Amino acid sequence: MKFVCAICLCFLIVVNTLAQVQTATQADTEKIKTRIAKLGVGHKITIHLLNGENHHGAISKIGASDFEIAEVDLKQIVRVYYGEVKKVQGEYGEKNAFGKRPNPKTGIFVLFGVLGGIIAAVALSIPKT
């Protein structure tokens, strides 16, 4: 009987933990709100939500508790509450071969890495006299 009670208690703890919804702190929410207001309507953005989703599009409406973006991939208007947003980027890149939209800054880092590798390979291949 004690074993069954212990299992039930563990189950309730796990279910309660999984059921909790992540929300941003008030300070984080204000930072996101300020960032969206600064970018303004019509600006292209990428938003990363606390639940792991990402949306890419242009800001179409800014409200007191939420904002809307014209989502480019879904081809619809998406309403987002400031408290759901983890991070905002002021741009989005084109889709790659896998259908994902990578961070545009990543491409610059890859370019410099490849160029640095080529320069290093050429420098090492020059015979020393």
Image (cartoon, rainbow, N blue to C red):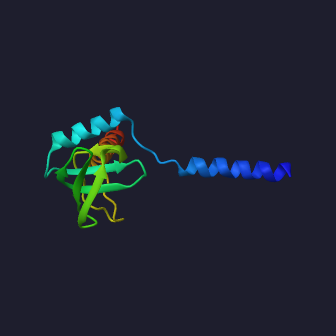
Given residues 49 and 64, the one toward you in this image is 64
Q: Residue at x 27, y 56 (%)?
A: 79
Q: How many marks?
A: 0
Pinpoint residue 128: horizontal percent, then vertical percent: 34, 35
Compared across the picture, whether 6 is left or right of 74 comes to right
| Whole-percent x, y for residue 114 in the image | 32, 47
Q: Which of 18 and 105 is in front in this view?
A: 18
Visible residue check, residue 17: yes
Q: In which quarter of the image is the C terminus?
A: top left
**Up-down: is 26 above or below 115?**
above
* Point 83% across, 50% down: residue: 3
Foreground pick, 97 / 12: 12
x, y percentage for residue 45? 23, 50
Q: Residue furthest bottom?
A: 75
Q: Which residue is drawn at 24% across and 66% down?
A: 76
Residue 1 pos. (x, y %):
86, 52
Is residue 129 visible in the rendered image? The answer is no
Task: Please name the residue shown 34% across and 35% down the image.
Answer: 28
Query: Residue at the right extreme?
Result: 1
